[in-house]
Amino acid sequence: MMPISGQEGRGRRGEWLLTLPSLVWLIVFFLVPTLLVMAIAFKPAEINGGIGQGWTLETWRRLLLPTYPAIIWRTIWLSFLCTVICIVMALPVGYWLARLPSRWRTWALMAIILPFWTNFLIRIFAWKSLLHPEGWIKEGLVWLGLIESQANLLYNSGAILLVLVYTYLPFAILPIYAAAEKFDFGLMDAARDLGASRFLAFRRVFLPGIWRGLWTAVLVVLIPAFGSYAIPDLVGGPTSEMIGNKIAQRVFTERNLPHASGLSAVLALIVLLPVLVSLVARMKEERAGASRKEGRS
């Protein structure tokens, strides 16, 4: 192993000094609270809403009841389906934005960002009004003969998925656009000249070229979707609850903090899974890049 020179050592110390405030912030306000929540999940709950003495596995036994696996599964498939739909819709939009002339691109981005200027809850209530049994969406679908008059567009998993996609679609578009803007579209033209179809060039050249933005879009949609609380609470109803709704019930209604901590720990583990996959993929890419450099030298 080559010894580290003084200049390189000073550079690394400078990197650590720059990283230290963020690292301390993450440890104090993210890692420590997460560990405390997981520890509380092993404590007994008191009748008055406090945390009892000693340790127990009662919370984890209750999480094995038939109700909770169904809620956890509903949270997972709704979040993943929302992410897939958002990515499929965001890819052509990000591609189109990157190819737009600069004078039109600003206006298109403004149209995408504009919903963020409205309060999150107001947007959910707007969808609740649109999907109301007397709303114009249902009346239009009934008039077209696509649904029956007895059908209910609210308080089901479909309504949750619709509002989730509407809410998180801009989060998928923006990182894909940011990556596509830096992409060299001359590579796609070269692929077309070599005989590739437009779709094949898009799949084999464009997608690998923006994979970092693509993976970022997956994370920024999937992770918030896992923790959604207001959307399923307002448009989902009691038969379409997600983990976030159960955590809120255990905290504010039953005052069962260990049970809420157990559900939060399960949610944290589910959220950490795609992050760990991302880290592993990045490490493999860095190792592959280092191996290619060594092979060339």
Image: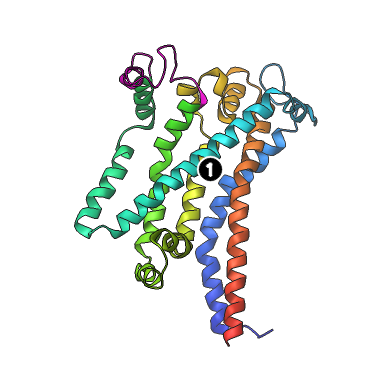
In the image, residue 152 lies in the stretch drawn in magenta: yes
Q: How many marks?
A: 1
Q: Is residue 15 above or below residue 86?
A: below
* Residue placed most toward the observer, 209 or 282: 209
Residue 192, given in percent of the width and then of the height, sits at 38, 68
Mark 1 burial class by Cα count in 10 Å: few <14, some 14-19, many 20+: many
Can residue 262 be seen from the camera position used here? Answer: yes
Asked which quadrant contains residue 58, the reply is top right
Residue 228, given in percent of the width and then of the height, sits at 51, 33
* Residue placed most toward the observer, 207 or 43: 207
Q: Residue tagged by mark 1? A: 223
Asked which quadrant contains residue 80, the reply is top right
Query: Left or right of 195: which side holds 75?
Result: right
Q: Residue at x 56, y 45 (%)?
A: 29
Query: Left or right of 242: which side holds 63?
Result: right
Name the quadrant of the N terminus.
bottom right
Query: Left or right of 283: which side holds 92?
Result: left
Residue 90, given in percent of the width and then of the height, sits at 40, 48
In the image, residue 154 lies in the stretch drawn in magenta: yes
Q: Is residue 215 above or below residue 244?
A: below
**Disc 1, SS:** helix
Q: What are the residue bounds of the magenta stretch?
A: 132-157
Give the residue furthest to the bottom: 297
Can residue 5 be seen from the camera position used here? Answer: no
Give the residue furthest to the top: 150
Most prominent secondary structure in the magenta stretch? loop
Residue type at mark 1 is Ile
